[in-house]
């Protein structure tokens, strides 16, 4: 498991769920989800859920500033799910999400996953996320894992290939 990676001055560190800045960012994440989806359609994880053994969580820092977070959940031996991708409001549109996604793809390759999938919201507010994921080769798919069809969800997936190795 990759524990600490620095890419373009962004340090992506494993863990951080007890750091106050991370706690605040994840709280902001859950509040934002509640603005755009009904409770039964919110699949964002809280702090306790992110501590499950099948989930690895990373926080992304530039110096002492938290820029974002991401997690990877193992669904099967060859299939992972992107969870809790969030960029801080102050860091939006600065490439933080792309750096975290490159990190997750490299980790998926290291774990020998053949597929990486995700669920995100369907509302207009999620359009930047849809564009980011599509730019990394994710395409829409049906529900996977324990998900069911939901008009408030967009499901995306892509194959993991050797090209996903971090430079």
Image (cartoon, helix red, strand yellow):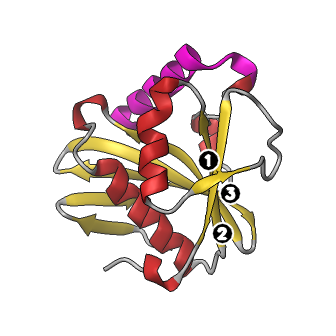
The local secondary structure at tag 1 comes to loop
Q: Earlier in the sequence, mark 2 or mark 1?
A: 1
Count residues near mark 2 (Cα–Cα under 10 Å), then give few for <14, some for 14-19, many for 20+: some
* In this view, the mark in front (2 or 1): 2
Left or right of 125 in this view: 39: right
Left or right of 63 in this view: 81: right
Left or right of 142 in this view: 81: left
Q: Is residue 15 visible?
A: no
Q: How many marks?
A: 3
Provide the residue designation for mark 1.
51
Count residues near mark 1 (Cα–Cα under 10 Å), then give few for <14, some for 14-19, many for 20+: some
Provide the residue designation for mark 3.
53
Stretch of the chain drawn in magenta: 18-40
- The quarter of the rendered structure image containing the C terminus is bottom left
**Image position, residue 40 (x, y; %):** 75, 22
Count residues near mark 3 (Cα–Cα under 10 Å), then give few for <14, some for 14-19, many for 20+: few
Q: Nearer the viewer, residue 153 or 2?
A: 153
State the separation of the CA atoms marked 1 and 3.
6 Å
Q: Which mark is residue 115?
A: 2
């Amino acid at each position: 498991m990759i524990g600490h990676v620095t890419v373009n001055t962004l340090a992506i560190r494993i863990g951080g769920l007890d750091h106050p800045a991370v706690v605040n960012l994840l709280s902001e994440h859950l509040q934002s989800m509640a603005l755009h989806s009904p409770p039964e359609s919110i699949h964002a994880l809280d702090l306790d859920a992110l501590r499950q053994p099948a989930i690895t969580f990373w926080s992304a820092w530039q110096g002492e500033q938290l820029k974002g977070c991401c997690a990877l959940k193992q669904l099967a031996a060859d299939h992972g799910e992107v969870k809790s991708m969030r960029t801080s409001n102050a860091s939006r549109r600065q490439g933080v999400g792309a750096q975290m996604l490159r990190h997750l793809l490299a980790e998926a390759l290291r774990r020998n996953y053949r597929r990486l999938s995700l669920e995100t919201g369907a509302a207009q507010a999620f359009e930047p996320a849809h564009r980011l994921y599509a730019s990394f080769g994710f395409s829409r798919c049906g529900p996977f894992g324990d998900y069911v069809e939901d008009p408030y969800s967009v499901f995306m997936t892509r194959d993991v290939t050797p090209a996903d190795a971090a430079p």
